[in-house]
Each structure stands twice: as C-alpha cells, then as structure tokens.
Amino acid sequence: MSRRDYLANLRAATPAVYPSMLMCDFGHLKDEVDRLESAGAQVLHLDVMDGHFVPNLSYGLTLVEAFAGITRLPLEAHLMISNPGDYIERYFQAGASSLIIHAEAVERPRPLLEKIRDLGAVAGLAINPPTAADTIRDCLDVCDQVLVMSVMPGFGGQEFDRVALDKLRAVRKMAGPDLLLEIDGGVNQATVGESVAAGAQLLVIGSGIFKHHDYQAALRQLTAQAHQN
Ligand code: DX5
Ligand code: ZN
C-alpha cells in the first residue's frame, strides 16, 4: 500500500485508541498482542527509550522486530532517544510504519521528517508538555502526525497534564485538516473525552488498558468513549 493510502486509512479510522505496549507482559507477547488485536486495536504504539533523552530505558530494535514478527498490525515507533537521525532507517527496517521523533531531541526536525517520508513511512513529531506549539510551526508542512505529550515522557502511569489540550487546539489551528493529531500520557476513562473534544484523533493508552485484567473490555470501552465525543 502506498504511503498516501495508508495515511488515508489511518485518518478514516479515527478516533482510535493505540495501545502503548510499555506495560504489557513481555513474557507472553504473542498472547498480549492477540488479545488486543481481537478487541479491535488497529496500530500498536511502541515506546523506545534510551535512558538519555528520557530517564528510563525500555527497549529498542530487537523488540520492534519481535512485534513485527508476531502481528500484522502496523507499528508506530515513538522514539524517545537523543539522536533519532542515526536510527530512523533501522527502526523502519525493523518494521515500524510510523516513526515519531521528538522536537526537543534535535535542532532541526525538518530533514529527519523528510527522511522518514522518503523511506515511505508516516512522519510524526512529538512535543513535551513544556514545549510550545509554536516551536513546530515551521515543520508542520513535513509532518503527517503530531504527538502532543500529556506527561513528561519516560514512564507509564503518570497523571494527565491538561496543558496538552490547549496545545492540540493550537496545532490544529496552525495545520491543515489532514494532519493527524495524537495524545500520549495519562489518557484513561476520565480524560479520553476531553482529549477527543480538544482535537485528538489518536489516543495512546498504556495503563488505562494494561492495569485492567480484561484488556479487551478496557480497549473497547475506551474506544466507545472516544466515539461519543
Ligand atoms: C510515556 C510513553 C507513553 C506511556 C503511556 O513516556 O510515551 O506511551 O507509556 O502510558 P500511560 O497511558 O500509562 O500514560
Ligand atoms: Zn509513547
């Protein structure tokens, strides 16, 4: 499928809940993914942390490859790493069809976003809670997706920061209607509604799914709530 068609499919399937796999049971990866897939997950969100850009280390290429080997669901790599430019190609080859880099990690995101698009992947740019929406204005024409963080990245299970809501609205105003808007961090049953109301189309959810025994029920309920807005 072409990049263009893939993006059109992603847009058509919004609002959508993308499970963040940070808190899954890595000893039973295939079961975990199968459960989410049969509950309607469309994309898996993979949190890559380097212990440098963020104060936590999660996983890297090997695990992205492992996910790619056990599911046909598209994978989105959220690169919380200091030198994303050195790794973009490798994460794409490992199986990620969307690559999200952080605006705070590089001086000039533009060439990296262009590189991601040239590879045929979806180009995403993330901003942390203290980063103003205006700082990415000049890059929006080369972004397919903007990820507004509603926690400081590094850990799952943190409290939702409402600063993300105004920022979603600000990014939508600056960008055209085709840009995909995503929110990540502390999204759960209590915050999913206001996130969608502020313009989030893609809702990354970790503990809101994985802290429940029945992941499928949690995912279905969160998706239904997102559609009510
Ligand atoms: C935070 C990660 C998130 C996080 C989501 O650094 O980018 O994807 O794990 O988990 P919850 O939903 O628990 O905040
Ligand atoms: Zn994430």
Image (spheres, rainbow, N blue to C red):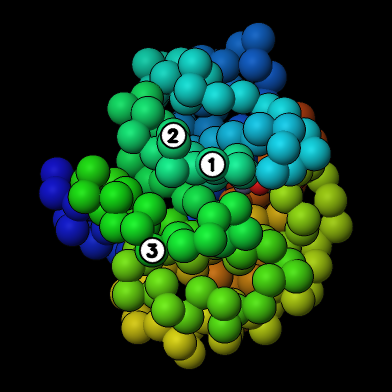
Residue 166: % across, % down: 67, 83
User: In front: 100, or 180?
Assistant: 100
Say which label, 1 or 3, has the lower sequence index.
1
Q: CA distance from mark 2 to mark 3?
A: 16 Å
Say which label, 2 or 3, has the lower sequence index.
2
User: In front: 220, or 156?
Assistant: 156
Mark 2 Cβ and ligand 2 under 8 Å apart: no
Is residue 19 placed above or below 124 in the rendered structure?
Answer: above
Identify the residue position indicated by label 1 in the image: 83
| Mark 2: amino acid | Tyr
User: In front: 12, or 228?
Assistant: 12
User: In front: 146, or 110?
Assistant: 110
Identify the residue position indicated by label 2 in the image: 87
| Mark 3: amino acid | Arg
Determine the residue positioned at 48% across, 22% down: 61
Residue 10: % across, % down: 33, 57
Q: State which quadrant residue 109 falls in.
A: bottom left
Disc sitting over residue 110 in the figure? 3
